[in-house]
């Protein structure tokens, strides 16, 4: 894209093209002047017509106001006269008395020219004042008003404006009409006078569109044309409300106004040629002036064109110079002696980010960043004031905010008199160069601050550059080391055995790392990691090596101490009386002591491959794994559980396990250390102890002979049921039974048979009671059944069923045997003893009533 030319060059260059453009502009200017003149003339034309129209409307409003006043006076006079007539018994019978009444009415209203009284048929009864033809009947508009019973109305009569009112008798019947004519001289006296209102003509038009001229009678030959235009106007114009409006005709201007509320219009007219006479003279003068201006302009355009031809050659020379400067890739600027920019080339615009228009007229300080030293400006102005060129660097800020370093040459440009006229500046961007230099300095500082030993070594093993750490370890200066071979610094044996093999591998193109003990002149013997990386030049050929030596002596000592500590730990752990292990997150053992291995009968390889997790008993595996995952996920700090593990021979043993995370930040890399102790014997002893306790508890609540609940437990359970009843209202019942004539069995058959009968009765009680019932031995041959959630009726039925079952049972040796039953249900306020007493009383009543029966207490 073509760049914009500088202003001072473009202004000269454009002179060669101004021959045709100046002429074109002059013609356009003349057309604009002619158009402006035409517009001014048209505006004056409209103003002239508008002013004439306003005068017409002013005249018409004055005339309409005078007419309205006259009609108001006439209407008042008519009202009084009509009122006087309507008060007579016979309104129109006394004709001789009418004339004095009319004369008095005219005397009260000087605006009236005359009064006429017509009867209902339109015949003139009497008149006063200017009367015209005495025998003339009422005009049609008066007759029409009487027919339509219009109370008040107006119109024309014999060339006069007239107002009329109906005369109505007491029954409302129209008897005639009284008509008043208005004096025209009094109305015309109210019209505007003067030259501005000359040539105006006033007309009145009634509802029948009949026009009557009021003023301006000297129309001569144009009178007929005006009346024709007026006739066409009133035919098109309808009666309107109050207000004055202007109508422009082809030859005349008209102003129209409705008079009062009556169907009469006032029209003012003036001839257009009379209005525009002065405007035509002005238009003729303006046209002559425009022609004269055109001749003068043509003369000066001819002189201007001759001057442009001479300047065209100068413009071409400057254009060639401009194109050469514009194509230079370096930013160039030209300023005046006050440092205002006159020109910048395309490279300057592109680099600064500012447009050419934004830069022209500004000072170069628009690019100042504030980071250029003040001494630079002082040196610049000192050189320019001596008339000498100056070269230096500026830190400039581009439009996008970035800062660039420009190396600039500024030289003064002298005119033909030898005086400095301009300053010429050419710049080059050295930002990247200075940044590279700064970056190299920072890299050198970073390298020198590093704890590692860094050296750049040539392909023939010569030190090219080393950092401060390298010199410190060697105990030498930079001059002693740089340029010296590695063999001289480290000695032949150490270089050949330890360092050269690493460097040779890197010279083949592969990075190499090794660790070895190296002797340094300034630090003594140190354990180092030697790393060497090839540095390639053009053609990817290895030109040098980047060698790093990291001192790992402290780490080496720490590792050796750690290994010794680990060995002591493992030796101690092998003799511990508990199992100790290390594992990863998946449960694979990385270490297990001898106790752990012997307890499970597995060796280290087996534990490392499968881990302790594979030894968990299947029934315990889910719970153990879940607790282990809680620890891995960070939900718990430590892991502890009791579980069964299956050893090599399939033996199941109980272990108590505990572990804690000790290493690794990531879950996959974390390590866990834990302990296990064999609890198999302890668990077995606990199991046996629990069995013994269960047996003791069962014996403490069970009758030894019958296996039923003993009396103490029955009393305890009965007290519990009483408490439930007191709190929740849940009822219960007791059944007490006694074996009939049981003493005879013991006396005749012995206690062994008696004991067998007791056991058989107990078995029948267990078989014929519900699961919720509690059968028990109360003492001797007496038994008791506790029935929770059972009322007396239910307990009675249960006892009766059991009695029948016992009665049907055959006992060894003694055969048949029966029992007596007493039943009692708990009642409000009962304690255990009251409930038992009622059941015992019921039992004795059953015995006294013949035994082998159930009695409710």
Image (cartoon, rainbow, N blue to C red):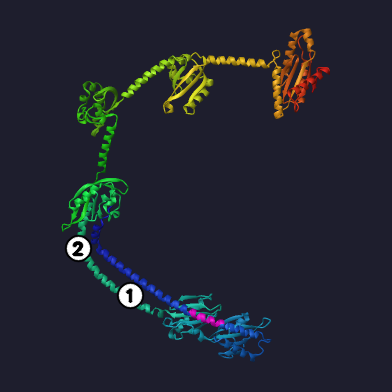
**Disc 1: which residue:** 286
Q: Is residue 668 above or below residue 50?
A: above
- Residue visible at 25% across and 68% down in the picture: 301
Q: Is residue 472 above or below residue 207?
A: above
Q: Which label's residue is closer to the chain start, 2 or 1?
A: 1
**Residue 67 belongs to magenta span:** yes
**Disc 2: which residue:** 310
Question: Which percent across, then down, holds residue 511?
Answer: 28, 28
Examine the image and state in which quarter residue 576 appears. top left
Q: Secondary structure at mark 1?
A: helix
Foreground: 809 or 578?
578
Question: Which percent across, then down, holds residue 55?
Answer: 44, 78
Q: Is residue 438 above or below residue 376?
A: above
The residue stretch that appears in magenta:
60-72
Q: Give the label on residue 406, or none.
A: none
- Quadrant of image for the C terminus: top right
Regarding residue 284, the answer to whether it shows in the image is yes
Q: Are marks 2 and 1 in contact (CB under 8 Å)?
A: no
Q: Is residue 262 left or right of residue 598?
A: right
Question: Which percent across, then down, holds residue 71?
Answer: 55, 82
Foreground: 348 or 162?
348
Examine the image and state in which quarter residue 491 appears. top left
In space, the residues marked 2 and 1 are separated at their CA atoms by: 38 Å
């Amino acid at each position: 894209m073509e760049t914009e030319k500088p202003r001072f060059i473009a202004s000269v260059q454009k002179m060669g093209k101004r021959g045709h453009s100046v002429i074109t502009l002059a013609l356009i200017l003349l057309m604009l002047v002619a158009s402006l003149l035409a517009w001014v003339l048209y505006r004056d034309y409209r103003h002239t017509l508008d002013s004439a129209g306003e005068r017409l409307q002013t005249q018409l409003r004055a005339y309409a106001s005078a007419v309205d006043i006259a009609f108001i006076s006439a209407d008042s006079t008519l009202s009084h006269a009509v009122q006087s007539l309507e008060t007579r018994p016979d309104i129109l019978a006394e004709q001789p008395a009418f004339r004095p009444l009319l004369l008095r009415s005219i005397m009260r209203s000087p605006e009236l020219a005359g009064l006429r009284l017509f009867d209902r048929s339109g015949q003139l009864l009497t008149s006063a004042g200017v009367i015209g033809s005495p025998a003339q009947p009422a005009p049609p508009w008066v007759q029409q008003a009487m027919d339509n019973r219009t109370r008040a109305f107006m119109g024309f009569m014999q060339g006069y404006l007239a107002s009329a009112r109906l005369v109505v008798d007491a029954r409302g019947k129209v008897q005639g009409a009284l008509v008043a004519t208005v004096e025209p001289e009094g109305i015309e006296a109210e019209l505007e006078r003067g030259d501005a209102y000359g040539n105006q003509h006033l007309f009145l038009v009634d509802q029948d569109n009949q026009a009557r001229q009021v003023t301006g009678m000297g129309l001569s030959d144009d009178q007929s044309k005006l009346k024709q235009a007026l006739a066409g106007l009133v035919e098109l114009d309808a009666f309107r409300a109050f207000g004055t409006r202007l109508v422009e005709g082809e030859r005349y201007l008209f102003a129209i106004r409705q008079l009062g509320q009556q169907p009469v219009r006032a029209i003012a007219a003036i001839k257009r040629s009379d209005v525009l006479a002065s405007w035509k003279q002005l238009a003729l003068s303006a046209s002559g002036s425009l022609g004269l201006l055109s001749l003068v302009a043509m003369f000066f355009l001819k002189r201007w064109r001759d001057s442009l031809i001479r300047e065209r050659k100068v413009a071409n020379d400057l254009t060639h110079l401009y194109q050469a400067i514009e194509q230079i890739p370096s930013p160039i600027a030209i300023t005046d002696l006050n440092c205002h920019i006159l020109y910048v080339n395309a490279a300057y615009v592109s680099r600064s980010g500012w447009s050419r228009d934004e830069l022209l007229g500004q000072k170069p300080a628009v690019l100042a960043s504030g980071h250029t030293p003040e001494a630079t400006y002082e040196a610049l102005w000192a050189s320019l004031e001596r008339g000498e060129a100056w070269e230096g660097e500026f830190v400039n800020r581009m439009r996008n905010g970035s800062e660039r370093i420009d190396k600039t040459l500024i030289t003064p440009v002298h005119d033909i008199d030898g005086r400095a006229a301009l300053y010429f500046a050419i710049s080059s961007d050295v930002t990247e160069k200075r940044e590279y230099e700064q970056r190299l300095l920072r890299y050198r500082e970073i390298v020198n601050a590093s704890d590692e030993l860094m050296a750049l070594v040539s392909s023939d093993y010569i030190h090219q550059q080393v950092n401060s750490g390298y010199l410190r370890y060697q105990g030498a200066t930079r001059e002693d080391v740089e340029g010296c071979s590695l063999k001289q610094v480290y000695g032949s044996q150490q270089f050949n055995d330890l360092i050269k093999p690493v460097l040779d591998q890197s010279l083949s193109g592969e990075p190499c790392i090794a660790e070895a003990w190296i002797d340094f002149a300034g630090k003594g013997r140190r354990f180092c990691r030697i790393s060497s990386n090839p540095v390639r030049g053009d053609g990817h050929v290895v030109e040098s090596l980047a060698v790093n030596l990291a001192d790992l002596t402290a780490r080496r000592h720490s590792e050796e101490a750690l290994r010794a500590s680990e060995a002591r730990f493992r030796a101690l752990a092998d003799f511990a009386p508990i199992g100790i292990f290390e594992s990863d997150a998946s449960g694979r053992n990385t270490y297990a002591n001898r106790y752990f291995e012997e307890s499970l009968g597995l060796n280290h390889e087996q534990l490392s491959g499968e881990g302790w997790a594979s030894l968990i008993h299947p029934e315990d595996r889910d719970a153990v794994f879940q607790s282990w995952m809680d620890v891995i996920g960070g939900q718990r700090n430590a892991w502890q559980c009791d579980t069964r593990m299956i050893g090599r021979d399939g033996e199941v043993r109980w272990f108590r396990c505990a572990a804690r995370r000790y290493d690794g930040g990531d879950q996959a890399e974390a390590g866990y250390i834990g302990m296990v102790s064999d609890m198999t014997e302890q668990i077995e002893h606990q199991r046996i102890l629990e069995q013994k306790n269960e047996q003791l508890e069962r014996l403490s609540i069970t009758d030894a002979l019958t296996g039923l609940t003993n009396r103490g437990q029955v009393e305890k359970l009965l007290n519990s049921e009483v408490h439930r009843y007191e709190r929740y209202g849940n009822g219960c019942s007791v059944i007490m039974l006694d074996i009939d004539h049981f003493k005879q069995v013991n006396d005749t058959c012995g206690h062994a048979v008696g004991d067998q009968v007791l056991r058989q009765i107990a078995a029948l009680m267990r078989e014929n009671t519900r699961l919720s019932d509690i059968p028990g031995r109360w003492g001797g041959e007496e038994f008791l059944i506790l029935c929770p959630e059972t009322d007396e009726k239910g307990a009675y039925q249960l006892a009766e069923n059991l009695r029948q079952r016992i009665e049907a049972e055959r006992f060894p040796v003694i055969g048949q045997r029966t029992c007596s039953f007493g039943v009692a249900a708990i009642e409000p306020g009962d304690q255990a003893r009251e409930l038992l007493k009622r059941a015992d009383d019921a039992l004795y009543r059953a015995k006294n009533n013949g035994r082998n029966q159930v009695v409710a207490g």
